Image (cartoon, rainbow, N blue to C red):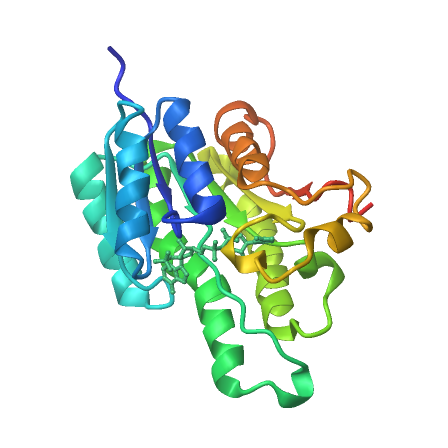
Amino acid sequence: MAENKVALVTGASRGIGKACAIELAKAGYDVAISYAGNEEAANKTIEELNALNVKAKAYKFNVADKESCAKAVEEVLADFGKLDVLVNNAGITRDGLFMRMSSDNWEAVINTNLNSAFYMTNPAIKTMIKQRSGCIINMSSIVGQMGNAGQANYSAAKAGLIGFTKSLAKELGSRNVRVNAIAPGFIQTDMTKDLDPEKMAEHIPLKRLGQPEDIAKTVKFLAEDATYITGQVIGVDGGLVI
Ligand code: NAP
């Protein structure tokens, strides 16, 4: 039997990351997941991944910390032997009008949502370049394209991920490493639990909020089927950005 491909999904104890890990496992990937501190949710995700008969392991570390990210990638490589897909998904919001935005809230969001992609991708691509194959998927957002009042920090981080994606795609194309971003619209997770789904849906052409699985299917497509797609930002937003 051919050995399974290996995916590492950050922030996969809950929400979009969890759905991505499960979708990749359904496609036969062994999956390493990361989380910040929610042990119970991470264990539940691992149980669900094990039920799909793939190898799965959870790693607790802060994606905003460079050394922890390097150590985690090293551990994943030691445990799984290789890395085919990296999904830079972990993220947070610290919303507020820019006039009153603290440096702490600015830095927390930039470090967790943007610098994390550098910290994770830097060690990961070394092994992908050696393998002469790999796929990196960065979880951006429609607000990285449109901006959003009250989210200057988050929009800056998500727009930064788009520039990062396009530049890295140009650098790594010749090594057969593809780099793409996904720009989700409003997806029903803990992050958006305070939004009124019916009110939001009025503005969305498909008239519903997205589900984590809508993003997960796109991750699986980019990882498995999109062999000639790199440097792109795939909008998965029910038509919100047209
Ligand atoms: P979520 O439900 O709040 O889940 C966040 C995940 O990230 C959890 O697994 C959490 O771990 C992990 N995490 C948070 N901070 C971390 C840190 N410092 N180090 C390591 N892990 C950390 O979020 P989501 O809605 O699924 O969002 C996932 C990604 O999609 C984010 O990048 C978000 O910005 C992006 N996105 C979401 C939406 C949306 O509408 N939901 C739209 C556009 C883009 P714990 O469980 O341990 O806390």
Q: Quadrant of residue 129?
A: top left
Which image quarter holds the N terminus?
top left
In the rendered structure, the answer to whether residue 74 lies left or right of residue 65 reads left
State the residue at coordinates (26%, 63%): 68
Question: Residue 197, position in %: x, y?
Answer: 69, 51
* Image quarter hosting the C terminus: top right
- Measured along the vertical axis of the image, is residue 82 above or below residue 163? above
Q: Residue 145: where, in percent of width, then height? A: 72, 57
Q: Does residue 72 show up? A: yes
72 or 11, which lies in front? 11
**Residue 7 placed where, x, y %?**
36, 36
Residue 205 or residue 56, whichever sits in front: 205
- Do we see residue 133 in this rendering? no
Q: Is residue 213 above or below residue 148?
A: above
Position in image of residue 14 (x %, y %)? 41, 49
Q: Toward which corner of the image does residue 28 lie, by quadrant?
A: top left
Q: Quadrant of residue 212?
A: top right
Q: Is residue 46 left or right of residue 208?
A: left
Depth check, front residue: 201 or 78? 201
Q: Residue furthest top?
A: 1
Q: Residue at x 77, y 55 (%)?
A: 199
Residue 226 to residue 40: above or below: above
With respect to residue 208, does 37 lie above or below? below
Residue at the image point whose x is 34% and y is 47% from the top: 124
